[in-house]
Amino acid sequence: MCPGRLISRRRLLAAGLLLAALVWMVLRLTALGQPTAGPASVPAAQPVGHSGSVLLAVRTSGQLHSLRLPVLARTWLRDSRPDIQIRLFSDMPSVKEFVKLLAGVGVEVSSRCGQGHTASVLCCRLAHEIAVFLDTRHGWWCHFDDDNYVNTVAVEAMLASYDSRRPWYIGRASSDATYGRGSHTQLVRFATGGAGFCVSRAALMQATKGILHGQFESACARLRLPDDVTLGHILWNSSRVRLTHVDEFHSHLEPLAALPRDSLAYQVSLSYFLQRHPPNTVDVEGLDREQDPTRFISLHCLLHGLRKCS
């Protein structure tokens, strides 16, 4: 073989290896830059309105404002993050008094739905949340109740693993509900509303025909299902969006004290139920139960590394 041709081939081989090494390095750096699932890794802040931003809706009611909202106002409602917009959804305008000192927290009053805790009222109010979300530019709608502690850092870290431009329905799977009669009975796999859930814009856009203009409330009444179950039904039947189960959502229906303390920083949502003995709360040191019956204040101090808890 001609020496000149051999040298030319060697140069081509060396150039190929160099190119392959450069490609590997780019891919490696890209992978290292990807966020992980833990709350310590949060996507870089971007202006509200990009596909990864979140409308975090907290449902409350007038009869519970003074009982539940003060502890939220002292704890996680103050955890403002650039990519999360928090709004309180209430049935009474008195909710506005609680957000005056909370920068960045908005208010929505669903007066047309009426008051109370009936299935029809709750279905109407959930439909109102969806309508408000679709009128924004956020990529995610996350729903929680006023007895939830929401770890906003964990919310961001979790959603960083999903693309809001694809249909996602994320939450804690409940026991399957049934509707219909006889051979027409069907199962619905849905996320427990009391633990919270997150739905991507893409998923809701695919299901708008079954949600907007009173269709969601009509479906609740026709199926005789609660609001969270109806949502799971519509998402599956309208756009074949299956629930993605995530363990880190928690409601008061679980034994919360069983959660290891070293896992609390990774949980997306937590709750409490005080009307039992002993109360169903997370097990965390801090203030005594008389000062902090829900344990949310002590939990907040733990998550934020505060030595003095008050």
Image (tube, helix red, strand yellow):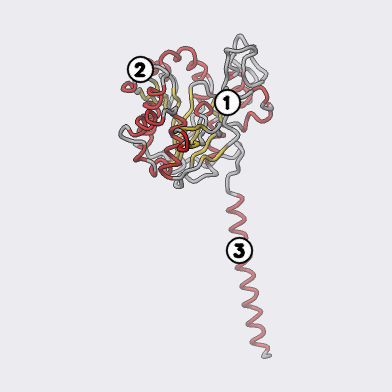
Q: Residue at x 51, y 32 (%)?
A: 177
Contact between labelled residues 3 and 1, with CB atoms less than 8 Å apart: no
Residue 214 percent location from the top left of the image: 32, 32
Q: Determine the image quadrant of residue 296.
A: top right
Mark 2: which amino acid? Pro
Mark 1: which amino acid? Leu
Task: Give whichever of 155, 223 is nearer the camera.
Answer: 223
Q: Residue at x 62, y 18 (%)?
A: 280
Earlier residue among tags 3 and 2: 3
* Residue under pointer 3: 22
Name the secondary structure under disc 2: helix
Residue 27 percent location from the top left of the image: 59, 57
Earlier residue among tags 1 and 3: 3
Q: Is residue 83 visible?
A: no
Residue 61 percent location from the top left of the image: 42, 18
Which residue extends farthest top?
290
Left or right, 280 with respect to 75, comes to: right
Q: Residue at x 66, y 27 (%)?
A: 259
Q: Determine the image quadrant of residue 13.
A: bottom right
Mark 1 to mark 3 CA distance (whole Å): 45 Å
* Residue under pointer 1: 270
Mark 3: few/some/many CA within 10 Å (<14, 14-19, 20+): few
Mark 3: which amino acid? Leu
Left or right, 121 with respect to 163, comes to: left
Mark 1 to mark 2 CA distance (whole Å): 26 Å
Q: Is residue 154 visible?
A: yes
Query: Which numbered tag is attached to residue 93?
Result: 2
Name the secondary structure under disc 3: helix
